[in-house]
Amino acid sequence: MTTTFRDLLAGLGRTALGTWVKLPAVDSVELLAHAGFDFLVVDMEHSPLDVLTVHQLLGAARGCGVPALVRVPDRTPSTISRVLDSGAAGVLVPHVDTPEDAAAVVAAGRFPPHGARGYGPTVRAGAWGADVPGYRASGEQVAVIPQLESREAVDAARGIGSVAGVAALFVGPADLAVASGHAPDAPDFTRLLDDVASAAKELELPLGTAVGSAAAARALPGHHDFVLVGNDASLLGQAARAVVADSR
């Protein structure tokens, strides 16, 4: 059985290492799992992946025993519900700027009375109807993680993190840099990151972020409980370019 993302963070004893999945190929998921990543995030926001393809990618991840989140394209409840029904260990939700936004996305991921997620256990998350109690329990086990990508979100980080059901805080550094108008290496930008880290620590919530390379991951200031490094498309492209350069 695949470990839940919450259990992974609680029991790993070190920073969890993941990467984005953007390619519509189940083989990509298997390759990343065999490479040793602790978790994966299937990216619907910045890729052309549709719900059916995500369903297939999640099946591959579950077969490999690797917890896979889905970064949904927006806060639409129906998309959140469908990817959770397909077996996602949780959702990473972009552009959550207020506690009200956070409450809405948490509700989309939890069954009544704690939320508004539709109940239908004849799906993968319910073993196609063979595990109704497990399906019901999954509503409390999934990780709903807001992405903080604006100055407004950073200012509201403590309120967002205080919403019951929020599993972690995640800083989207690229979007935050663009939205704030600060360069990623500017002191003012670092202060924004520090504000979120401080909020996560006070609330005893896991903190996550994403970087483009292993070197950037090693250079991250402070403590992060989970870090996404690169993505499957970039990893393939970098390896291919290296082979071409070395061969020539």
Image: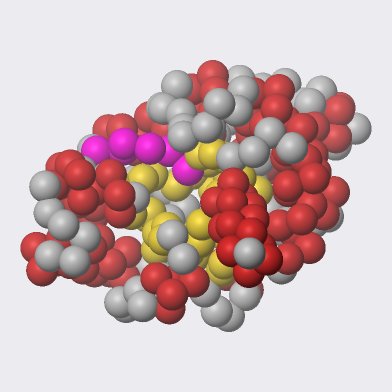
Q: Is residue 210 above or below residue 136?
A: below
Return the residue nearer the eye: 45 or 8: 45
Q: Is residue 96 magenta?
A: yes
Q: How is the image coloured?
A: secondary structure
- Judge by depth and name the residue closer to the eye, 31 or 44: 31
Which residue reaches farthest front?
Answer: 248
Please identify the quarter of the rendering in which residue 22 is found. top right
The part of the image, by quadrant, that contains residue 13 is bottom right
- Chief SS of the magenta region: loop
- Quadrant the C terminus occupies: bottom right
Q: How many marks?
A: 0
Image position of 237 with respect to 189: above or below: above
Residue in view at x 36 percent, y 45 percent: 147
Residue 32 coordinates in the image, percent (x, y): 71, 57
- The residue at 30%/49% (across/down) is 174
Residue 229's x, y, as percent?
50, 61
Left/right placement of residue 237 relative to residue 96 reads right
